[in-house]
Amino acid sequence: MNRPDPDLRGPPIRLLFVCSGNTCRSPLAEVLSSRVASELGSLTVETRSAGTHTRPGLGASGGALRAARRHGLSLDEHSSSVLSKEVVEWADLIFAMSPGHLYGLRALGAEDKAVLLGAFATDEKLDGVDGEGDHLAVPDPFGEPDEVYEETFLTLEKYVELAMKRLVGGSGR
């Protein structure tokens, strides 16, 4: 068996994914990160997702549910969470989907542990404020057709895989 001994992997890294409604991008990133961590085998993660402008208890959007299913993942049990100081404190590293989400995170004390997912994945140095990093944002597919959800999924898949590989390499923690 080529699986590492779980005791040798160290404590889990607590990852938080943040978007606006917590019904599309951040739940997709959450389930993708769990799958990629499992595939890599050398990284133990605990994951959560939250929204800056949502209410608790919403299910994943239909487009996100279908995109996840097309790729062998499930969001059937997803229930939205509101971004809070407590969940920010819980996280070791927080991945925001767009620069605007960083404002809310910093207001809750996230400071240096919050970063744009796309910037972390590509190792691009930027602070993500004042429009900087817009080119690395994950577009919001909410209300769009399934083709847009598919594009969003593929962007998330690329960024999450790169980010998780960077964490395994030790340069992100």
Image: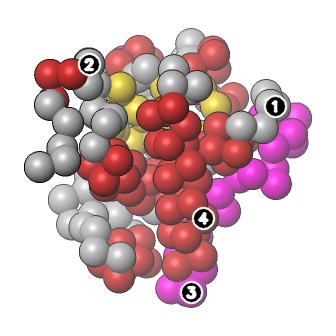
Comes first in the chain, label 2 or label 4: 2
Residue 147's label in the rendered image is: 3
- Who's the residue at 55% across and 37% down the image? 166
Q: Looking at numbered disc 3 in the image, what kind of residue is underneath it?
A: Glu
| Residue type for callout 1 | Leu
Q: Residue at x 21, y 22 (%)?
A: 8
| Disc 2 residue type (three-letter) | Gly
Q: Residues within 10 Å of mark 1 (few under 14, many from 20)?
A: few
Q: Is residue 66 magenta?
A: no
Which residue occupies the foreground of this view, 57 or 117? 117
Q: Is residue 136 magenta?
A: yes
At horizontal 35% and vertical 26% (from top left) the residue drawn is 13
Instruction: Measure the alpha-carbon separation of dots 2 and 1.
Output: 29 Å
Mark number, residue 105: none
**Image quadrant in which you'd find residue 156:** bottom right
Mark 2 vs mark 4, foreground winner is: 2
**156 sits to left or right of 119:** left
Which residue has dot 2 on it?
A: 10
Per the model, the C-alpha gap separating discs 3 and 2 is: 39 Å
Q: Position of residue 102 (x, y in %)?
A: 66, 32
Q: Which disc, if any, is residue 155?
A: 4
SS at circle 4: helix
Can the viewer see residue 99? yes
Q: Secondary structure at mark 3?
A: helix
In the image, taking residue 86 as reference, residue 96 lies left or right, namely right
Instruction: State which mark lies toward you, 3 or 2.
Output: 2
Which of label 2 and label 1 is nearer to you? 2
Which is the main secondary structure of the residues drawn in magenta? loop
Mark 4 and mark 1 lie on one chain; the one further toward the N terminus is 1
